[in-house]
Amino acid sequence: MPAPAALAQPPQKVPVAEGYGGAVATVDLDASKAAISVLRRGGNAVDAAVAAGAVLGVTEPYSAGLAGGGFMVYYDARQRKVFTIDGRETAPQAMTATSLEGIPFEEGVTSGLSAGVPGTVANWDLALRRFGTLSLKQALQPAIEVAAKGFVVDQTFYDQTDANAARFKDIASTAKLYLPNGAPPPVGSVFRNPELAATYRELGRRGPGWLYGGRLGEEIVATVKNPPVTPGSTRNVRPGLMELSDLRAYRALMREPTKISYKGLDVYGMAPPSSGGSTVGEALNILEALPRVGLHEYLEASRLAFADRGRYVGDIPGVPLRELLSDGFAKERACLVGDTAMPHPAAPGQPDGSYEGCPPATGAATPVAQEGPETTHLVVADRWGNVLAYNLTIESTGGNGIVVPGRGVLLNNELTDFTFGPAPGDPNLPGPGKRPRSSMAPTLVFDDGRPVLAAGSPGGSTIITTVLQILLNRYEFGMSLPDALAAPRATQRNTAQTQAEPAFLARYQAELEAKGHSFAPNPEIGAATALEFLGRNRIQAVAEPSRRGGGSAMVVSASR
């Protein structure tokens, strides 16, 4: 009997890097290497971001993949303008406001019904055609190599597989890929996905139409409508509503970014259907309207902004975005912030353009819907000064748990981001062709027209508070960017209790409870990536030192 293969040590990631010629930060070393390789060969930030995103579909398949979606916030240095691309998944045309009603959330997670029409490939294609220099085929090459040759399994990949093992076992195609020999691949083993390598190769050769109406699209629709449940499984895996016509109709969209001014800086984010730009922006405006800013004020501003998010933001006509981000509305909301925590829940405000005094809040708050904690985020800058912040996701860890047979691709369960209902008047109820509200908040910060910082995070609705807290740590509390990312986090989303990491509770719980706050522990909030321009063309790239196994920061050159 042959001896078992020796297990390798997962390669070491470095969370902070400084240098010149371009930079990247992702959660994964292979993805960061792919982006840096593209930059060194003369590609730009968009080329590098797509290459890294495709690699993350291999090495972080439970957070990202070609069957998911995402948002890009991009600064084009030549045009001196910020652009955003909405590659969010859409609901099938057959979905109505009541399609999810009465379904237990956990049953919605693992189902064909939760699979949205994928947007990632359209996002990559539009970004490359509009701003890149590589073809989609070229941008996919690093991911093809990683999928074919394999990557070393780390503790995070093992833990995520193990946490999903029960539902993965109930889907035959998923168990075959991610539970070889009936168990998660061990830490230090090499995991290969030759089917995904072949899928990427064919996608590069045939182009996006292969997904959006072609053979790959047909296979995705067949999987959604008839999930390959393991014989003998008792799991109720509902079929979905997606048709090939939904894929043919899908478009990634160019949208205007959100923009607010904070402490003399311009902060750009993602507009609806993301709530990231509006909620981060409103909270910053509220904080700027206050006479002092500390952690109590951070929690209260976030509470108020989330109340307004729930009432007004979704993929609907007439989101009052201009008023939500106006200084007048911020001052009206800021007057509710006192020395103690306000009663729960905070009611939404009235962004109606008439702002006088301090009117009492009226109306009912909308509960925060469940959102998957996974997703991934990356930042890239190139030698020409282009900068990109990019969130991509398949929603829950492992998406809907269903691998397309023979393709090595997990489907998303993005439609669970809709409100299940019944919830009359909720802006985030499902509907035909509608995009579920997102919390993804890729963010760019400018000083006097020049980009100075890019940041973002995974984490469901905690994305918003993670980005907000990083910005406050950096610009209000004077931390360096590495310290701003590493600092312990708390997330208040208009909930009765503020979730907080153990280190935050140890340091701040007593003083904040004295102000009326109530806490619940959360072992880990977010997994951010960011970069900052330090002057004289020097860039600092920053990833997490430990959250989610730590991230990978790299630069093109450590010296000029």
Image: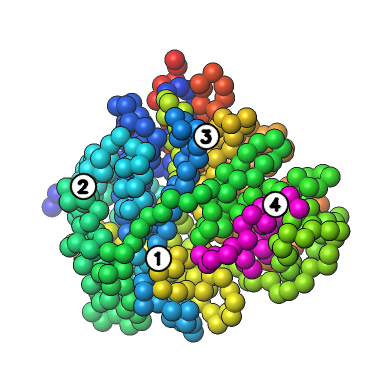
Label 4, label 1: how far apart the Cα atoms are: 29 Å
Residue 53, how many percent across, how many down?
A: 36, 46
* Mark 2 or mark 3, earlier in chain: 2
What span is colored magenta in the figure?
299-328
Q: Locate residue 366: give its quadrant.
A: bottom right
Can you identify the residue that label 4 sits on? 326
**Marks 4 and 1, the one that precedes in the sequence:** 1
Q: Amino acid at mark 4?
A: Ser
For marks 3 and 4, the one nearer the N-term is 4
Whether tag 3 and tag 4 are in contact, CB under 8 A, the answer is: no
Q: Quarter-wise, where is residue 182 in the image?
A: bottom left
185 or 216: which is nearer to us? 216
Judging by the rendered image, the residue that carries numbered circle 2 is: 204
> Does 399 lie within the magenta span?
no
Report the residue at 69% width, 48% height from top. 284
Above or below — where is 371 with respect to 545?
A: below
Amino acid type, label 3: Leu
Q: Nearer the viewer, mark 1 or mark 3?
A: 1
| Left or right relative to 382: residue 478 | right
Mark linked to residue 90: 1
Residue ID at (23%, 79%): 231
